[in-house]
Amino acid sequence: MSFRADSPTVKNVVPSPNHDARTSRIDILLLHYTGMQTAWHAGEASWKGAVDINARSIGIEVVNPGHQYGYRDFPDVQIDAVIALCRDILARRHIRRERVLAHSDVAPTRKDDPGEKFPWARLAAAGIGLWVEPSPIVGGRTLSANDKGTDVEQLQKQLARFGYGIEVSRFYEDKTRSVVTAFQRHFRPERVDGLADPSTIATLRRLLTR
């Protein structure tokens, strides 16, 4: 397979052996870190009820060894290049800013990338992605493993409304913790522990009002 780049920011085209046909209009821009030699872009994933994420998204692989191989900060020059590429793709594809997502957002039980070190606030300042300043971390009621009831139900409904693939079970099981962890990596990176503390819940609610 060979093709020409459709972006003026691209200098070299290196086709991946992993690809298949597009079947949907592109409406998601997905950010990854490399972390491995080859990949099927999004893989098994979902967002806002759609499960064909490979078919409807463009992925940007940002070079970083990832959590398993020495996760590190993203250099400024690298992020400058990411911002330029994102702007080009968003303008050409007419992708809404709230559809700029992390791989971990669409595959929270499987993926951690691009992780809590990725500077989402900097991208949002450049008009890329949805962001609010995270609510301060304070004490208070925190939802965690094996909690159940209306508070858990409300959290699950809000996460689902935002876009995450989560069932409303009223029980804080492993899937819920994985989704909360993914949310924290993207939107409340100061502490990533999978516990729905007041800061996490308040940040989620503020994002839902944007």
Image (cartoon, rainbow, N blue to C red):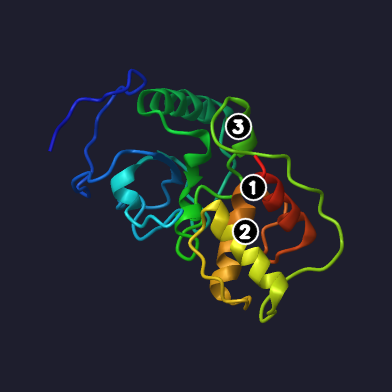
Q: State the CA–CA distance, disc 3 to disc 2.
A: 22 Å
Q: Quadrant of the C terminus?
A: top right
Residue for point 72% across, 57% down = 201
Q: Which mark is residue 7?
A: none
**Image vertical order of residue 184 relative to residue 177, above or below:** above
Location of mark 2 (residue): 158
- Give the residue type at disc 2: Gln
Mark 2 residue element: helix
Mark 1 residue element: helix
Residue for point 53% across, 56% down = 67
Res. 160 image quadrant = bottom right
Location of mark 1 (residue): 208
Location of mark 3 (residue): 124
**Image vertical order of residue 76 relative to residue 111, above or below:** above
**Image vertical order of residue 71 relative to residue 87, above or below:** below
Circles 1 and 2: CB atoms closer than 8 Å: yes
Seen as rendered, the residue at the extreme left is 1
- Callout 2: few (<14), some (14-19), or many (20+) C-alpha neighbours within 10 Å? some
Residue for point 52% across, 34% down = 97
Res. 73 image quadrant = top right
Circles 1 and 3: CB atoms closer than 8 Å: no
Q: Nearer the viewer, mark 3 or mark 2?
A: 2
